[in-house]
Image (tube, helix red, strand yellow):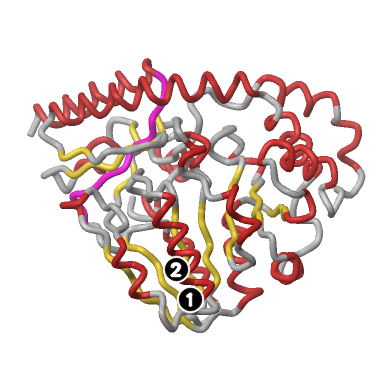
Amino acid sequence: MDDIAMHGGDIYSYMEMNGAKPLDYSANINPLGLPDNVKKALAQSIESYSAYPDTNCRKLKEAVSAYEKFEADCILFGNGAADIIYRICYALRPKTALLTAPTFSEYGQALENTGCKIEYFGLSPEYGFTVGTGILEQVSGKDIVFICNPNNPTGNLADRSLIYKLAEKCRKENCILVIDECFMDFVAEKKSYSFIEYLEDFDNVIIVKAFTKIFAMAGFRLGYCLCSNKEILLKIEKAGQPWSVSTPAQVAGIAAIGDKDYLIRTARIIDEERGYLSKNLSSFGFTVFESHTNFILFKAEQTDLYDRLYKKGVLIRKCANFKGLDDTYYRIAVRCREDNEKLINAISEVIKNG
């Protein structure tokens, strides 16, 4: 079962071993599911799938440019956010890097693949894993800094004023700053936290985003980055293969980005259900960390909670493989009320049975 927990969303290993589909709380996917207009667009465009996809993603660029209010020529698409992250590392070949801990593991794996030396800025549970100004002191001598905002797996946000100071510090040190905003669209006040409006002022900053979570499109693998430095973008583009974004993924992305009602409904259900889950998790005596997105990190005394819920057909994310966390930390997604009640009932049964 250890391999299943390395990353969220591996329902296939579970089904192979158990012959049934689990209730998956390990992957942080929008509980509303794939938008209806995406399904319609895919069905209507099916005859076009026999041709090679547009390597420049022209129509998708126009749609995302309008959505992000950012120049289309400064947007690059890839096979999910992970593809973009690996391309950045392969293209720029940094020698030294700074990461927070805990944070998304793919940054470290991509950097290690290029032989990069990694230093960590530890985030403390006593302060809710908040990024402090101390991170500025560790930028010196680094070639690249990754920061996830909102952070995965903690769910908390870094103040934009601090990110701005970090971008300035990185520029002074001739360092690239990569800001992962893949979960930013779940944040109610995202305009107060996203760094996109400042991108034109910094040619050393790259923002990574994805359709994966917010539009429940994990199976399509569609991510992108935004950067005002076209020379850097060209290097990142050349670090990957030309047909990395399929035609169905481009069609789905264009349809999804125009569905404003879907995003409004998402914000409402995530806010309501996150509160429901946090309250119930706290009632079990767990330490629940404040989250601003569609997942929750909590700490429990039970180190076998994952295994016991697994036996009940429920997958959660155990977080011991995140640097800075141990086997008492778990992460769950925020889903619809019907599923959330099943999860809470399953945890209650596990605790009552010792």
Would you call the spot at circle 2 few (<14 residues within 10 Å), some (14-19), or many (20 or more)? many
The residue lying toward the viewer, choosing from 241 and 306, is 241
The residue lying toward the viewer, choosing from 185 and 28, is 185
Q: What residue would you read off at disc 1? A: 112
Q: Is residue 240 left or right of residue 280?
A: right
Q: Residue at x 78, y 41 (%)?
A: 60
The location of residue 253, given as percent across then percent down, is 71, 37
Farthest-out residue, top: 338
The location of residue 279, given as percent across then percent down, is 21, 25
Q: Is residue 347 left or right of residue 5?
A: left
Q: What residue would you read off at disc 2? A: 108
Q: How many marks?
A: 2
Q: Are the residues flagged by discs 1 and 2 in contact, CB closer than 8 Å? A: yes
Q: Amino acid at mark 1?
A: Glu
Q: Residue at x 64, y 49 (%)?
A: 223
Q: Element type at marker 2? A: helix
Which stretch is magenta?
A: 326-336
The location of residue 284, given as percent across then percent down, is 13, 30
Q: CA distance from mark 1 to mark 2?
A: 6 Å
Q: Element type at marker 1? A: helix
